[in-house]
Amino acid sequence: MKQLAKLKQCIKEAKNQGSGLILLVGPPSSGKSRILRELSGTKIINLKQELARELVFIAREERPRHVQKVLNEIISLYPDSLVILDNIEILFFPELQLDPLHVLEHFSKDRALLVAWTGSHADNKLTWSNPHHPEYKVYPDIDPAHLIIHLTD
């Protein structure tokens, strides 16, 4: 599969640099999770499940103050040079008051971070979800250093 080969090359580049954010971008049901599973040897973090499991013990109004620390604890459990995140939609929940792309950039500074991103990328603009979704977000002028692999339906 062409996307898998491109993804492996991007991972190799990011690992050689010691850091980097790789976004696997595609619409829902485009095969992002399947491609991540095809990469052998690295655990995939279901971020929605892992983060929700930890945040449930923190009062709702306190979660924005603690979410970065909890994310750091989750990601630090995986000391590999490559960390893979799937199901990241929880980062877009308004109650957490996060800028999801900024959070991902932060965690990719000292390791390669591969993230399944539900949305699209065109004309240097990255979107999350679709305009009718409550968590729809647009990032104009994406940093060209990010490695972006596109999936189509």
Image (cartoon, helix red, strand yellow):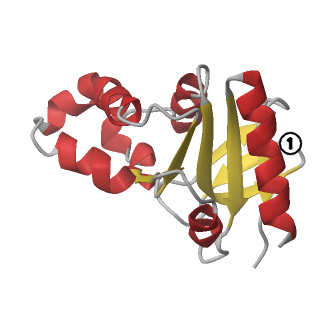
Residue 82 drawn at (x, y percent): 59, 38
Q: Nearer the viewer, residue 30 or 95?
A: 30
Residue plotted at (85% across, 55% down):
6
Residue 142 in sight: no
**Residue position for label 1:** 124
Residue 113 locus on image (x, y percent)? 60, 38
Relative depth, front residue between 153 and 114:
114
For the residue pair 55 and 136, the one nearer the viewer reads as 55
Secondary structure, mark 1, is: loop
Horizontally, is 94 left or right of 40 in the view? left
Visible residue check, residue 139: yes
Q: How many marks?
A: 1
Which three-letter amino acid code belongs to the residue tagged 1?
Answer: Asn
The residue sitting at 46% across, 52% down in the picture is 43
Instruction: Give the residue at x 30% y 49%.
Output: 50
Horizontal side of residue 80 vs 117, given as left or right: left
